[in-house]
Amino acid sequence: MNAEIIAVGSEMLTPQRTDTNSLWLTAELNNLGIEVVAKTIVGDDRARLTETIADATRRSELVILTGGLGPTEDDLTRECVAAATSRTLVFSDALLQDILERFARFGRKMADNNQRQAYLIEGAEALPNPNGSAPGQWLTTAPDRHIALLPGPPKEMKPMYSAQILPRLQALQPPMQIRVLTYRIAGMGESDVDSLVAPIYTQYTNPVTTILAKPGDVELHFRARCATTAEAEALLAEIGPKIDAVLGDRIYSRDGSPLEAAVGALLKARGATLAVAESCTGGLLAQRLTSVPGSSDYFDGGFVVYSRDLKHALLGIRLEDIAGPLIYSENTATYLAEAARLRTGAHYSLAIVGVAGPGPDQGFDPGHVVVGLSSAQKTEARTLKLFGDRERIRFMATQSALDLLRKSYLAPSQ
């Protein structure tokens, strides 16, 4: 069974509100093996909402709407579902009585416009709402087509789903299991990754493949949906080695963990420690490393040496060696890396110097970054040319440094 979620309300289209209902519902539906194939936010516009509902019911077996069930003129969900399914609205005395009793329990008089909430779509079942005045509705339009109308406030929507929708879906949906295999790749662009893996994943309709790209990071998600866990895991076990074969060591994670966690796991497996010296990244590399629980097992610490004077005072770099444009040289990066390693006693160290922008410095444009790496066996530097704004360059510098350490110093063959 495939599902679509429609969040209703013009307020959901403003920057002040976030549609958290759809995220929660997606997780709940996935637990049943129901794939959410579309999510839509629609404002309080009668024609647009009706059209959206009609399109969704043609495409998907299950459509869940949240919001728009209140008592005011702009609460249009009931009317638009009725119009989209060519049905009428039927006034329910029983629903009205329930609403009246709710107001009476709180010692309040019901406003006349609350009577709007007592209208049922022709053929729909009313869904009790013990946490609010807006009842939900469940409508079956064909043996394999269902529409659920849920209130918008999460404190009302979630209990109604759990008590009313979940049992109905469990009865309709054959037991399904969803398993996900996530690869994360550094040092490649989205199009480069896709050119290598597309010949593989396009041979499969199950698992379904999703590619997500972030600066310096590409994620591959393979979602297998089967009747049993064993079948789903077997599908992933079939496609996984094929992806491994074409991407090789560019894959840094096979469980979705970020690069700093993957590097930390490699350090911990070796019983090794790491220190850092940072200039243009201003502590971002250390922050990423220490964001991982348990990083004290392998991260000794670091130096944020932004100025020439601190590079000299804390790490002993001679001022004449970092005068003028020399401060952005490979020599400076190697000096910093080796000094950080020796002064902390760490097994490995990373250093980052460069120009993050927004303007050039010492004749170097923003994105000129040099990474220094040091171990007991060797010390070296790599010059990078990064692109983007200041924050992107800073993040990409840390991403590149971690990936260089992973591939050049921590790989199994090293």
Image (spheres, rainbow, N blue to C red):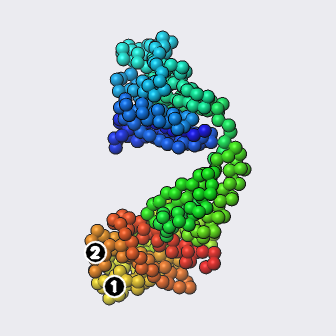
Relative image position of residue 330 (x, y in whole percent): 41, 83
Q: Is residue 223 above or below residue 356?
A: above
Q: Residue at x 66, y 56 (%)?
A: 236
Examine the image and state in which quarter residue 204 appears: bottom right
Q: Which residue is drawn at 48% across and 64% down?
A: 191
Task: Count all numbered tags in the image, as a single digit.
Answer: 2
Label 1 sits on a secondary structure element that is helix
Q: In this view, does 86 lie above or below 115?
A: below
Q: Dots 2 and 1: beta carbons under 8 Å? A: no
Asked whether, in this view, residue 10 is left or right of residue 37, the answer is left
Amino acid type, label 1: Leu
Q: Which residue is drawn at 72% across and 50% down?
A: 230
Which one is in front, 221 or 276?
A: 221
Amino acid type, label 2: Pro
Relative image position of residue 33 (x, y in whole percent): 62, 42
Assign the N terminus to one quadrant of the image. Answer: top right
Query: Is residue 157 among what the camera can see?
Result: yes
For the residue carrying disc 1, how many other residues have a C-alpha within 10 Å: few (<14), some (14-19), or many (20+)? some
Which one is in front, 51 or 214?
A: 51
Assign the C terminus to one quadrant of the image. Answer: bottom right
Real-space CA distance between mark 2 and mark 1, rounded to the nearest whole angstrom: 15 Å
Q: Name the residue under label 2.
A: 360
Asked whether, in this view, residue 227 is left or right of residue 23, the answer is right
Q: Tell me the tag on residue 326.
A: 1
Query: Is residue 339 among what the camera can see?
Result: no
Q: Residue at x 62, y 57 (%)?
A: 203
